[in-house]
Image (spheres, rainbow, N blue to C red):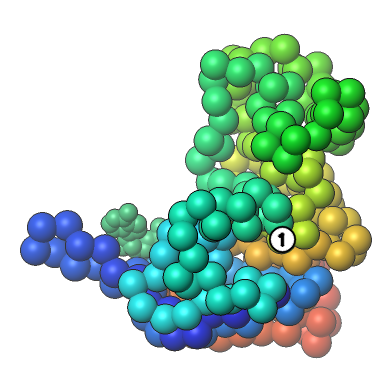
């Protein structure tokens, strides 16, 4: 589904060069759920952005669904994102000129879904994440946790086959964190491929596999199905 081969990403500002990713190779199979952990600044968000084609590697090659997208034009990449990918960002990226409902419907508008179906699907997604009672508010009128739930509803309303989530439970209390994890897991059970960055070992263990990044490199890749019951560790 995703295949990265020796991907590196450096950022240059003035004379200072930061290498965020160093020769990272990674394969994510269709239907897999992979979690990514690692200390702050180790390159997790950079990797996720590259997987989602929001950023390009400085070197290396990258495939989505057997298509080498490394040299795709920006327009073609936008099309790949629109058709296949749902993002849940660490910063919510909600549009404050729109209501909660309009924010959630936006992803469906991009897919040219009709008004009636948009309203229905957005309504269901808002119910599922406990924000339906805030449908006509602006995002800035909501708490951080509520805004995160709007961002999750917006990412999942299109039922994308690839979901990229950057600390989706980072701003949530444990109850709503479990809600979001349960929803992500059920989408994965229904066939969506999922890559999620998290700081929570409990949430990481929902994934079949956990990759640990350190200083821009993959240190370990752990199969979670073989360890007894990691979810009960904390
Ligand atoms: N747009 C950017 N410009 C310059 N440096 C960046 C940029 N994005 C990330 N970095 C640097 O790359 C490294 C990895 O960042 P990031 O992927 O955001 O880490 P993480 O998500 O693991 O906290 C950090 O040193 C960060 O400062
Ligand atoms: Mg990050």
- Closer to the camera, 185 or 85? 85
Tell me what residue is drawn at x 89 percent, y 30 percent.
117
Q: Which quadrant of the structure image shows residue 42?
A: bottom left
Q: Which quadrant of the structure image shows residue 7?
A: bottom left
Find residue 86 and report its horizontal and vertical position in percent: 68, 50
Find residue 170 and report its horizontal and vertical position in percent: 59, 47
- How many numbered marks, from 0 up? 1
Give the residue at mark 1: 162
Is 95 drawn above or below residue 148 in the view shown?
above
Tell me what residue is drawn at x 81 percent, y 71 percent.
31
Tell me what residue is drawn at x 56 percent, y 46 percent.
89
Q: Give left or right: position of 49 versus 80.
A: left
Is 102 drawn above or below residue 17 in the view shown?
above
Tell me what residue is drawn at x 36 percent, y 78 percent.
59
Which corner quadrant holds the N terminus? bottom right
Image quarter where ligand 1 lies: bottom left
Q: Give left or right: position of 93 versus 107.
A: left
- Closer to the camera, 110 or 221? 110
Find residue 155 and report its horizontal and vertical position in percent: 70, 43
Q: Give left or right: position of 159 versus 155.
A: right
């Amino acid at each position: 589904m995703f295949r990265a081969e020796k991907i590196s990403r450096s950022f240059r500002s003035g004379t200072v060069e930061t290498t965020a990713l160093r020769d990272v190779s990674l394969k994510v199979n269709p239907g897999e759920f992979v979690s990514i952990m690692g200390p702050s600044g180790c390159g997790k968000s950079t990797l996720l952005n590259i997987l989602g084609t929001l950023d390009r590697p400085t070197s290396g090659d990258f495939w989505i669904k057997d298509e080498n997208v490394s040299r795709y034009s920006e327009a073609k990449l936008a099309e790949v994102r629109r058709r296949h990918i749902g993002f849940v960002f660490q910063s919510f990226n909600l549009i404050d000129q729109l209501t909660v409902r309009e924010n959630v419907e936006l992803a469906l508008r991009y897919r040219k879904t009709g008004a009636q179906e948009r309203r229905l699907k957005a309504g269901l997604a808002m119910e599922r994440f406990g924000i339906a009672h805030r449908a006509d508010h602006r995002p800035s009128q909501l708490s951080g946790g509520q805004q995160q739930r709007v961002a999750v509803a917006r990412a999942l309303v299109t039922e994308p086959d690839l979901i990229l989530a950057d600390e989706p439970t980072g701003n949530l209390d444990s109850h709503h964190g479990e809600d979001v994890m349960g929803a992500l897991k059920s989408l994965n059970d229904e066939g969506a491929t999922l890559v999620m960055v998290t700081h929570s070992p409990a949430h990481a263990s929902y994934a079949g596999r956990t990759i640990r990044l350190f200083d821009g490199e993959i240190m370990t890749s752990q199969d979670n199905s073989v360890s007894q019951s990691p979810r009960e560790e904390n």
